[in-house]
Amino acid sequence: MNTKASTAKLPVHVGIIMDGNGRWAQERGMARSQGHLEGLKTARRIVAAASKAGIRYLSLFVFSTENWKRAKDEVDFIMGLVKQHLMRELDFYRQNRIRIRHTGDISGLSAEIARELQQAQRDTKDFDGMQVVLALNYGGRDEIVRAVRRLLDDHFHEAPPDKTQAASGNQCSMPCSITEDVIARHLDNPDIPYPDLIIRTAGEYRTSNFLPWQAAYAEYFISPALWPDWNETFLHEALDAYAGRERRFGAVHAP
Ligand code: FPP
């Protein structure tokens, strides 16, 4: 395994769109749920490998706001896996000093899952190792809508603009000066740096509403392998590819 390049220029934050669980199962004549079961094992392997590699933040796209459209059995199975994982794997996170975070709309999750998620975040909040961000009931557009709502709530719960402001024609307080920074501060996890690298497995070239605001300048790596087949070697392949990229953030470098 070549880890030279990845240690030379390591992304701080990696996001993964874990795709291909269903296809993995179908190829084997198994139920889709088996693919998700294997997918969860892979997630555990990759969390350990990423932490070992020195990644500081790992965002995993577990369940999107659109995934509710799947068959109820499949949704229930995935949610059951997530719940079990949060309840049973805390030792694994503790041993590796990994902090669990969440992004997504927690109000749309069942009370049980929401409780486990909050508990896991509380139990791991002081760990100084890698932070794993579970994107659960997550949609990028939904996150931006929620951010704007939070922004409006923050400002309209404050005292209304005073008469002098109104008299000067300025009818609103802070929301008048909306900048990228103001929106960014109202996203789910404003303290987390934007992802440098987004990996998608199963060979699909789509962003699927995953961190659209934060990943505006991320590098993408598409792996043809299905998520249940993913392992540390594939992760290092992605990290090596990232190390070889020139990031210009829209600028042009002098030759
Ligand atoms: C995509 O496969 C995967 C998902 C919808 C999410 C399931 C993810 C897990 C079970 C891992 C959970 C991880 C943690 C840490 C809780 P797909 O069903 O879209 O595959 P397909 O495109 O081949 O049908």
Image (cartoon, rainbow, N blue to C red):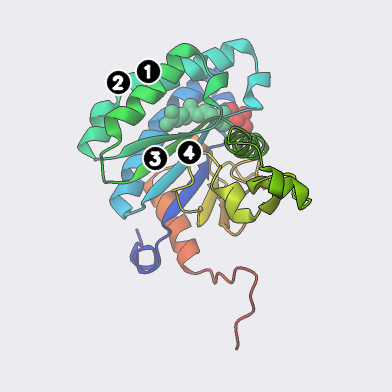
Q: Is mark 3 within 8 Å of ligand 1?
A: yes
Q: Is residue 209 above or below residue 23?
A: below
- Residue marked by disc 2: 88
Where's residue 247, x and y in %?
55, 69
Mark 2 is on which residue type? Arg
Quadrant placement of the C terminus:
bottom right
| Residue at disc 2, secondary structure | helix
Tell me the distance, in whole angstroms, between the alpha carbons under discs 3 and 4.
Answer: 7 Å
| Residue at disc 3, secondary structure | strand
Tell me the distance, in whole angstroms, between the alpha carbons under discs 2 and 3.
Answer: 16 Å
Location of residue 218 by image quarter? bottom right
Residue 60 disc label:
4
Residue drawn at x 63%, y 55% is 180
Residue 132 disc label:
3
Q: Dot 4: within a 10 Å radius of its alpha carbon, few (fewer than 14), some, or many (20 or more) residues?
A: many
Q: Is mark 4 within 8 Å of ligand 1?
A: yes
Q: Nearer the viewer, residue 184 or 120?
A: 184
| Residue at disc 1, secondary structure | helix
Q: Nearer the viewer, residue 106 or 23?
A: 106
Mark 4 is on which residue type? Leu
Looking at the image, is mark 2 or mark 3 earlier in the sequence? Answer: 2
Outermost residue, left side: 95
